[in-house]
Image (cartoon, rainbow, N blue to C red):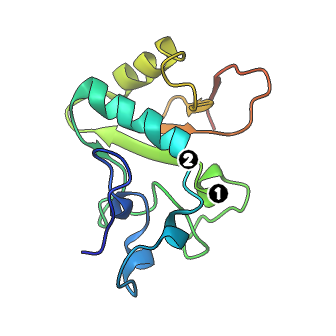
Amino acid sequence: MITKRITKNIWFHELVPVEFLKEKKYISDYDVRLLDIGLLSDIQKIRDHYNRPLIINDGKRFNWRGLRTKEYSGYNINSMHSWWRAYDFHIKDINVEEVRTHIKAEKGKYVHISAIEDKVNWIHVDSRFRPDGDLLVFDK
């Protein structure tokens, strides 16, 4: 599989739908230019805290939890996913509410996470502009 290391433990193929990689022979700097490295740094810190892989995209059941393109059936240009500034994930055998509570309690550690979705069975974090610096906790 074509991929590229983005952080210590996060690879490019985990951040994009499998369709994005089909015609690729390699991952170029152009392909990664829009990544929010601050948000990815915070996601890596979460991975380090739990010492377990985060499941973002697996190319199967979870294929649209990172970048969402026009090929995604629920595509919305206003979604932070469409701008590569949001990720949905879970950690195998760790309750999502525990992870959500940890992120909220450690906001000072995860300075690039500006919003988190509540009351869902996955973790959604994004880096939308928040002029007050407060963590936005939202639900649909």
Location of residue 20 in the rendering, given as x and y in whole percent from the top left corner: 45, 76
Q: Is residue 136 above or below residue 120?
A: above
Label 2 sits on residue: 86
Which corner quadrant holds the N terminus? Answer: bottom left
- Secondary structure at badge 1 equals helix
Most distant residue in the right direction = 131
Residue 113 seen in render: yes
Q: Is residue 26 above or below residue 133?
A: below
Distance between mark 1 and mark 2 Cα atoms: 8 Å
Q: Is residue 108 left or right of residue 56?
A: right
Location of residue 83 in the rendering, given as x and y in whole percent from the top left corner: 64, 57
Nearer the observer, 13 or 68: 13
Label 1 Cα crowd, 10 Å radius (few <14 / some 14-19 / many 20+): some
Label 1 sits on residue: 83
Location of residue 91 in the rendering, given as x and y in whole percent from the top left corner: 28, 37
- Secondary structure at badge 2 equals strand
Tell me the kind of residue under disc 2: Ala
Nearer the observer, 103 or 37: 37
